[in-house]
Amino acid sequence: MENKILNAIEGLNKRFDNFEIRFDKLETRFDNFETDVKGLKNDVKDLNQKVDSVESKVGTIEKQTKENTQILQALMHSAEMNKAVQDKMALDTARIQGDVIQIKSDVLAIRKDLSMVETITANNYADLAKLKAIS
C-alpha cells in the first residue's frame, strides 16, 4: 500500500510538475501578451497625437478656406460691379456715338443751308447792283 501511495504521490508530483511547466508557459505567454498590449497602447497614444495634429491642421485649413471664400466673394462682387460700370460705359459710348452722328448730319445740313444763304446773298447783291445801275 505504501507503494501505491508513493506511486500516487509520484504521479501527483509529475502532474504538479506538468502544471508548473504549463503555468510557466502561460506566464510567459501572458508576459508576451502584456508586452504586446503595452506596445498597442503606445501605438494608440502615437495615433492619438497624430489625430490631434491632423485635427489642428484641418482647423487651420477650415479657417483659411473661410477666409479664401470671403476674399473670393469680395472679388466676385467687385467683378460684377466692374462689369456693370463697363456696361454703362458701353451704353454711354453708343449714345455719344449716336449723338456725334446726329451732330455731323446737322452740321452738314447747316453747311448746305449756309451755302444756299451765301448763294442767295450773292444773288441779292447782284440784284442790288443791277438796281443801282438802273437808278
Image (cartoon, grey):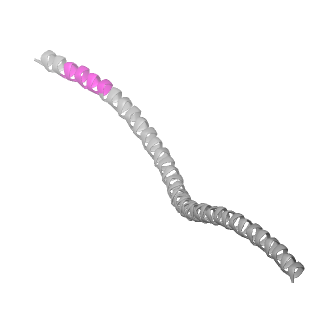
**Which residue reaches farthest front?**
134
87 or 122: which is nearer to us?
A: 122
What residue is drawn where x is 35% and y is 34%? 30
Q: Which residues lie in the magenta part?
A: 9-22
> Residue 134's image quarter?
bottom right
- Left-right relation of 42 to 10: right
- Left-right relation of 12 to 127: left
Whether 14 is among the magenta residues is: yes
Give how far across and how far down residue 27 sits, in percent: 35, 32
What residue is drawn where x is 25% and y is 26%? 16
Give how far across and how far down residue 19 sits, in percent: 26, 26
Q: Is residue 2 above or below residue 83?
A: above
Q: Is residue 109 above or below residue 35?
A: below
Q: How many marks?
A: 0
- Give the dominant element type of the magenta stretch: helix, strand or loop: helix
133 or 104: which is nearer to us?
A: 133
Give how far across and how far down residue 112 sits, in percent: 72, 65
> Residue 15's image quarter?
top left
What residue is drawn where x is 40% and y is 39%? 37
Give how far across and how far down residue 59 sits, in percent: 50, 57
Quadrant occupied by the C terminus: bottom right
Whether 54 is among the magenta residues is: no
> Residue 4's image quarter?
top left
Quadrant occupied by the N terminus: top left
- Left-right relation of 70 to 123: left
116 or 12: which is nearer to us?
A: 116
